[in-house]
Amino acid sequence: MSDKRRTFAVIDGNSLMHRAFHAVPPTMNAPDGRPTNAIFGFLNMFLKMIDAFNPDGVVVAFDKGKPRVRMEMLPQYKAQRPPMDPDLHAQFPMIKELLGALNVPILQSEGWEGDDILGTMARLGEQAGCDMLLVTGDRDMYQLVTEHVNVVSTRKGLSDVAIMTPESVDDLYHGITPALVPDFYGLKGDTSDNIPGVPGIGPKKASALIAQYGSLDEVIAHADEVKGKMGENLRAHIDDALLSRKVATIRTDAPVELDFEATSFPAFSADEVSAALGTLGITAMQNRFLALIGGEGGVVPAASAFEIPPVLRAAAGDAEALAAAAAEISRAIDAGEWIAAVVDDDKEEGALFGLTRTLWLATSKGLFALEEADDGTPAAVEGFKFAHGVIAGVLARLFMEGRVASPDMKALLHELSPVDSSEPELMDPLATDSTRIFDTVVAAYLLDSDRSEFDEAYLADTYLQMAPPAARGAEGAGEDAPAPAARTAALTLALVAPLRDRMARENAANVFDGIEMPLVPVLAKMERAGMLVDPDRLHSLSEGLATQIT
């Protein structure tokens, strides 16, 4: 082995499958009707972990059978848990088969829990000179953390994770080091696993007692010093505390093994993964997996640049340029094409206003920048009413006659129906035909609902298999780099077709067309209407609360 320590990720398969099942809506199915939402969420977390840590090897641990090892110590261990949901149960054989296609080792042993397999791998990996990442949602795993073993702790859904080091475990539990985590659980117990602990002692009291005396054994040795009901409970439940600590201690001697030298990731073939994902109907992630092995299988390498077409810039006073832009917009509307629209201004950070505003439009023929002064300087072009300015006039016609795409459709509607109800409303958002608007970020959210951000780099990579060029002002951008809003408009137009196709394949199109897009104008209308604030009623409430406080 080289001097450089290799990094291995060990995934708690049961923990992540449970979290994925409850985080991803149960609307996803394989072509044969089998549910796939947990698999989709698991794979998404898997890919995020690969992107974040780039491990040299990956293995997945699963529970197998009843947790006999702990049930022998505590017969009621996990007895209160309801049976696994049948739709989740059905997805475990499917994810294991898919992991086989990915050439990711699966570790399991009859009667042993995944926790103990993670613990065993953590110690074996350390001994082999590796840095270990334990990917799990179980906090009792923090006891395994060392200088070379970190826990990647999944928290909220699938997207919020914390990297637990010895220092962060200490900070979280206020003086509880990883080695003392079993003592901590011995006192506080764990209701999710039916571990009793000591009645009346929760996390804060448990950490305070251990911080004061140093360990569970020392807490017990000084039990007579603990005052009140807590002391009574502690003295009456010493055996429960010791048993709870034993049950909460992660084993590191599970009968599993791994050849760390021979295990690597990625080590799969494009054909096998494509076939496996196709069988499950999860084609949305195919390119992300294939990109890990160099874009095989006809995938365009992620380094390919997204091309920005030439720009026709038309200022409010430039009648000739405005006429050319108007002619192209009319052509695209008549042809029933999608037109991407993004409004930008030159307002500097911290300023109240800028000097000019620009409506960027992308059509199949190119990019158009329609500029106007912030005072809404009128202009006259055949086919458009510009009484309130170029931008308002063009948008009004687009919404009434065209097909409009945007990364923030609600913000675009507010250009004509301002949130500030003191400003004139040029178009009622409810007059918008929801079948003729397309919000690319909403579509991307439906396809990956556990993700919190949908930046342009992610959208271009995921749905176009391309990298967007650096925008003007970004580090490394050249003098001819496109304006950020120009890039956004061009990218938005390019995304409509692949997003629409992907939603059709993932059974999300009906939700997008029937719920999400009709809701956008309603939300815009609600935001303009605002909420009634009755000062007299608030004053009355204030007086009543003041009386109660007094």
Image (cartoon, rainbow, N blue to C red):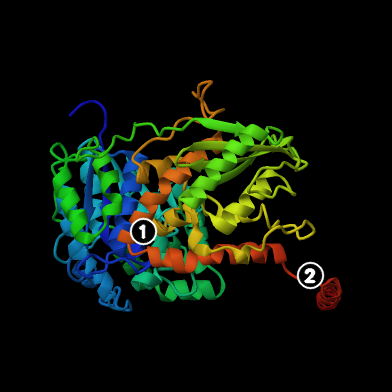
Horizontal and vertical percent position of residue 253: 18, 54
Instruction: Bin the neighbour count of mark 2 within 10 Å (Cα to Cα): few under 14, some 14-19, many 20 and up.
Output: few
Q: Which residue is drawn at 31% across and 64% down?
A: 37
The residue indicated by pointer 2 is 533
In the figure, is residue 541 to the left or right of 60? right
Horizontal and vertical percent position of residue 380: 71, 42
Horizontal and vertical percent position of residue 447: 38, 57
Q: Is residue 48 above or below residue 484?
A: below
Q: Residue at x 62, y 38 (%)?
A: 323
* Quadrant housing residue 15: bottom left
Q: Is residue 350 visible?
A: yes
Q: Is residue 507 above or below residue 364?
A: below
Viewer-nearest residue: 420 or 427? 427
The residue indicated by pointer 1 is 503
Q: How many marks?
A: 2
Residue extending furthest top? Answer: 479
